[in-house]
Image (cartoon, helix red, strand yellow):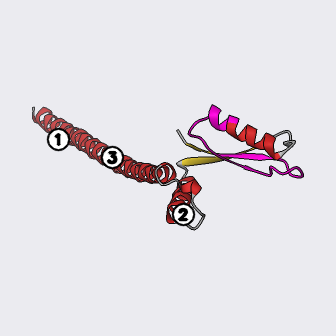
Amino acid sequence: MRCSTEHHRIVKFYASIKARRKALAIIGLIIAGVLCVRLIDRWTEARAQERAALDFQYWEMTNALVFGYALERTSDHPINRLDHERRDALVKAGYLKKREFPLRHRFESSKAAHAFFWRFAARFPGAEFRFSGVKPPATPTLTGICEEQ
């Protein structure tokens, strides 16, 4: 009988060790889960703050463009500088994309280039774009800046 009592004590002892290990494993998993959730929360909060700052810069740029008539001012005017600084910062941050499209054919005259420019502006309202190389020896290039979605 003594053997069976000793055996029961040993079995209970190992059972309690297994229960402790299970409890510690569950507690460890809960702690790891909480730490992961906090890490993800900090990361998403930082991304949201960065996105809000870029949205505000974009808003400032468009206000300088629309309400301040940034393109109609001289290049050293503060509103024009604000527009260019904000646009360059947003392109660098990846909020805006800058794309260049070389055109296949040259324009016959500056009148044809202006007509194309105005037709393009009418077809894509709100798009910011520029032409380079409009004069006959160069191939014209359309450079567009659009918001990354």
Q: CA distance from mark 2 to mark 3?
A: 37 Å
Label whose residue precedes the other's in the sequence (2 or 1): 1
Residue 50 vs residue 21, the one in the foreground: 50
The local crowd at label 2, few if under 14, some if 14 to 19, many if 20 or more residues have their Cα within 10 Å, is some
Let me know if residue 137 is in the magenta part: yes
Residue at horizontal 56%, vertical 39%? Answer: 126
Mark 1 is surrounded, within 10 Å at the Cα level, by few (under 14), some (14 to 19) or many (20 or more) other residues, namely: few
Please tell me whether mark 3 sits on a helix, a strand or a loop. helix
Figure check: 103 above or below 135: above
Residue for badge 1? 13
Mark identifier at residue 41:
3
The tally of labels here is: 3
Q: Given the image, on which type of amino acid does mark 1 rest?
A: Phe
**Which span is picked out in magenta?**
119-144
Q: Nearer the viewer, residue 95 or 84?
A: 84
Tell me the number on the disc at residue 81. 2
Furthest residue in direction right, as rendered: 137
- Left or right for 6, reference 22: left
Q: Is residue 101 above or below residue 119?
A: below
Q: Position of residue 18 (x, y in %)?
A: 23, 39
Mark 3: amino acid: Asp
Residue 61 versus residue 25: which sits nearer the camera? Answer: 61
Which badge, 2 or 3, comes first in the chain's sequence? 3
In the image, taking residue 148 as reference, residue 11 lies left or right, namely: left
Q: Secondary structure at mark 1?
A: helix
**Tag 3: Cα neighbours inside 10 Å, few (<14), some, or many (≥20)?**
few
Q: x, y (%) of residue 69?
A: 52, 53
* Mark sitting on residue 43: none
Instruction: Give the Cα distance between marks 1 and 3.
Output: 42 Å
Q: CA distance from mark 2 to mark 1?
A: 77 Å
